Amino acid sequence: MAVNCSAVKCVHNDKDGNCYAQVIQVRGSHATSAEGTICHSFAREELSDAEFAQEFDAPLLQASTSNIKCGARRCKYQVNNKCKASDVSISGDEVDCETFQVRD
């Protein structure tokens, strides 16, 4: 149930690819490939790590696939707007959901 994210400079990520967003929203209602999806929760890192850590008192919890709201209706892992994949990978500059697989 892991989420691995290599999105460049996202405020929710650490250097190891761990995501700490409370909710991940994947969009792409008409997507037929990973390139048609987007992590709508992506937020460009503007603060230094130290500044960001001081803004919140709550401990950070690593995101899991149960945190994902998915609008990619044609993905085989999307069921009732939730992701049912065991592991999810979000990638790079375009913040695509690399786990997307078109439903048969």
Image (spheres, helix red, strand yellow):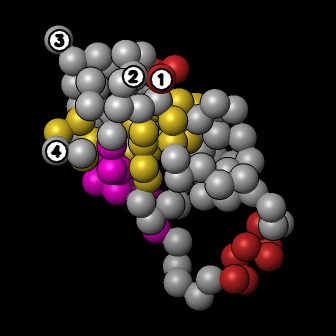
The CA span between labels 4 and 2 is 16 Å
Left or right, 83 with reference to 32: left
Q: For the residue carrying disc 4, how many other residues have a C-alpha within 10 Å: few (<14), some (14-19), or many (20+)?
A: few
Quarter of the image with the C terminus is top left
Residue identifier under label 1: 36
Q: Kindly indicate whether the residue at mark 2 contacts the one at mark 4 (C-beta within 8 angstroms).
A: no
Residue identifier under label 3: 104
Residue 14 position within the rendered picture, expressed as x and y whole percent measured from the top left: 65, 54
Q: Amino acid at mark 2?
A: Ala
Label whose residue precedes the other's in the sequence (2 or 1): 2
Closer to the camera in the image, 27 or 85: 27
Q: Nearer the viewer, mark 1 or mark 3?
A: 1
The CA span between labels 2 and 1 is 4 Å
Residue at the outermost front position: 30
Using the image, tell me which numbered label, if any, was put on residue 80. Answer: 4
Q: Looking at the image, can residue 73 be seen?
A: yes
Using the image, tell me which numbered label, if any, was put on residue 86. Answer: none
Residue at 75% x, 57% y is 45
Q: Secondary structure under badge 1?
A: helix
Q: Amino acid at mark 1?
A: Gly
Above-or-below relation of 9 to 46? above
Residue identifier under label 2: 31
Q: Secondary structure under badge 3?
A: loop
Residue 46 position within the rendered picture, expressed as x and y whole percent measured from the top left: 80, 61
The CA span between labels 1 and 3 is 17 Å
Left or right, 51 with reference to 77: right
Label whose residue precedes the other's in the sequence (4 or 2): 2
Q: Nearer the viewer, mark 2 or mark 3?
A: 2
Left or right, 103 with reference to 45: left
Q: Secondary structure under badge 4?
A: loop
The CA span between labels 4 and 3 is 17 Å
Q: Which residues are magenta?
A: 61-70
